[in-house]
Structure formats: structure tokens, C-alpha cells
Image (spheres, grey):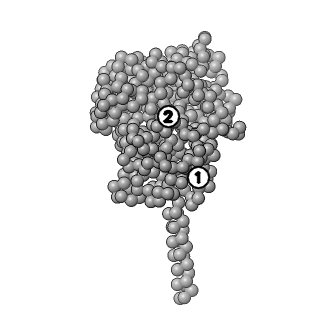
Amino acid sequence: MKKLIKLVTSAAFAVSVGATAVSAQALFWSTQAKPVEEAQKMRDVVLKDFPGGVDYQPSDDGPWLTRLQAELQAGSGTIAILGALHGSFSSMPADLVDLSGVDLGGAKVNAQYQELAKLGTGEQKYLPWMQATYIMAANKKALEFLPAGADINALTYDQLIEWSKTMAEKTGGPKFGFPAGPEGLKHRFFQGFLLPSYTKSMVTKFRSPEAETAWGKFKELWQYTNPASTTYAFMQQPLLSEEVWVAFDHVARLADAFNQKPDDFVAFPVPAGPAGRGFMPVIAGIGIPKTAPDMAKSKELIAYMMKPETQIATLRATNFFPVVDVQLPDDMPNSVKMSGPAIAAQTGAADAVPALLPTGLGSLGGKFNQVYNDTFERIVLGGQDIRPALDEQAKALKALIDEAKAPCWQPDPASEGACPVE
């Protein structure tokens, strides 16, 4: 009996110690680096040297916000730091700790992003963590079909349509690909690329004559788009299989193609429309909720994530680029080497029109995205007339913006109160 009691006591002690060890890890609650491989690299590589350990847990936006709100309402919580896109942070400045006093050890953070992360307050509500965008990729076989005189680093949408038409006619089938599947990021293309390129707006000019032209151009492009695009989520797979030769997607969703067959592909900027070269910079940040259980430890983890070596490790793990000044090593993946110049050309273009991710929408972000997806389905897939479809979708968009009371964000001009939908 004494041996049995001793055994049970030892087991209970071991469980207790194990639970303490787990609870001692800082919980990193994030909407980013969600794919299994990326999340594992975050745990095994990026965060492995942080003293005490980190429990990195990625989540979809809905559950991420639900848990955070529950902890804030309870007045205490387990989340040490938050990882999310700028838009997620924009609706919660009062719930975040001021990070102005965090010692970053001399790391030079992108000044524009750092100012954006103040969320209109005098406090550093979050710190930029990593950045990315969307670009174009092409199989080198496609280059011979480029329109005469076209510069692949300065294409227009009209030239992309002509290029796609020529490829379809010369090769016997459509070779342009687009991530229009259920898990594809098509809404970001419409929000941040297509519409700003024709309207210099994401919201206000949603139903304008210029927006009508933009959707008409995309309908034209769709004629030469691989019909399997309605199933595509990541464009790297159809590029590798050569189902498509030219594609648009997030840099992280093109990475495998560039890494596996770097000699087969080129990366280049997105096209421009009459209003400029609309593109969406994707800015992810890290912040601390006011209910963090150990504020000192949370701030240590924030500083750790901003170290140049951590930023480089994060780039390797996620294909999201650093937000601090770093000298990238020569052994970076081909995806980084290929995407970097395309991103630089895109962001530095004279006609660049940056379009920020939606902000101030809170839990309505998903419904906001659905408006753009529904517009695509009605006009492009359903063949509905553009004008009445835009008029109806504009009503849904206005109702959401008004409910959220979300002011305008770039590229729309600042507004007093809810962003108008003209």
C-alpha cells in the first residue's frame, strides 16, 4: 500500500510539474502562419530559443477574436501576445498595451508601418511584425507570347488580357490562372488590386462607372482563364503542374513553385489600370492584450520577435518579409530571391496605389470580404449585368460599413464617420 501511495503521489507530482511547464510557456495567439508546416516552423525554429518557451497557436479570425474578447471581458487571461493583420488590431486600440517603452535593442523598424501601428493614438498599440503582398508569376514558356513592346515589370491590365488571349489561342487552351477557389484569396485581388487600379478606391467608388469598367475588364480576362481556377487556393500547385503558365497570388502561396523550379519561373509586379498600379501591402503585427498574465514576459517576447535574426527566421518559415532593416544572408530560399525584386518594383513604381487591408470592421470583416466575392460570382461566374449587380452589392457594402461605423482607409480619402459608398 505504501508503495502504491508513493507511486500515485509521484505520478500526480509529475502531472503537476508537466502542467506547470506547459502553463509557463507564453501563449502566442495568432491569425498568421496557420498552415501546419508554417506553424511547426514557428515553434521549432523561430521561437525555440525564447527563454521559458512559447506555445504558438494559430487560429482563424473568428475564434481568434472570440477567445480574446472572452479574456478581456473576464478581466484576466492566458494570451501573452497577439499576432494579426493590421485590420484586426485597428478595432481594438483600447484593449492593447502601449509598447512605446519596449527595448528593441537598436532594431530599426519601418517608420511608416510603426506610425500606422499607433492606430491614431499617441501610443504604440502594436509593433509591425512582418510584411508581404501579392505578385504575379509566369512560366518562362509564356514569355514568347507577351504583347509587342510590353515590359513585364510594367504591364497594364489590357496587356495582361492580350497576353492571356494569345496564349490561349497559340497553345490550345487558357493558360492564365487565378485563385478563385473557396480558400483562394480572390477577394483581396478585387479589393486591393483591380478596383484601386481603375478607381483609386476600395469602398467609396465601389459602384462608380470606373468600377463598372474594371469588372468588365476582368470578365474579359476570365475568357482566357483556366476554368479549374474556381477550385484553386494556392497557385503554386497549378504552376508547377503547368496547368497554368501565368498567375496572381500571395507571395507565400507562390513560394513552392519558385523554390522547387526556380529556373522555370519569373516573378513580376501586378498590372496597372488607368488610375495606377493598385496593390495591397499585407502588414502583420504583434501586440499585447491588457489581460496578459505576465506583462514583463510578454514584452520580452515582443522584443525577441523584432530581433533581426528572428525576423530572418520568420521569413524562412513564412515567406513574409522583415519589417526591420536586415542584411539578408546569401542562402535565402529561391522564393525570397525571386519575390524580393518583384515586390520592390511593385511598391516603388511611380504609379503605385497602395490599398491597405480593410480596417475598423471588427467581426464584420468576413462579411465585407463576401461582398466582393459575391460581386465576382454574380458578374463573372453568373454572367449578370454589371451595373445592376454593382448597385445591389453597394447596398450590402454600405450597410456593413455603417454598422461597423468604419472610417475610410487607403486608398480612399479619410472620412468623418463611416466611409461613404457613393
Q: Position of residue 308 (x, y in %)?
A: 61, 44
- Label 2: which secondary element: helix
- The amino acid type found where label 1 is placed reads Leu
For marks 1 and 2, give the one nearer the viewer.
2
Residue 329 placement: quadrant: top right
Q: Name the residue rendered at 35%, 19% in the picture.
A: 208
Quarter of the picture containing the C terminus is: top left
What residue sits 45% from the left and 44% below the top? 124
Question: For numbered disc 1, what is the local secondary structure?
Answer: loop
Residue 121 x, y percent position in the rendering: 39, 41
The earlier-in-sequence mark between 1 and 2 is 1
- Whether residue 31 is visible to the viewer of this picture, yes or no, is no
Which disc number belongs to residue 382? none
Q: In this figure, which residue is indicated by the disc labeled 2?
A: 112
Label 1 to label 2: alpha-carbon separation: 26 Å
Residue 295 seen from this side: yes
**On the image, numbered disc 1 is attached to which residue?**
47
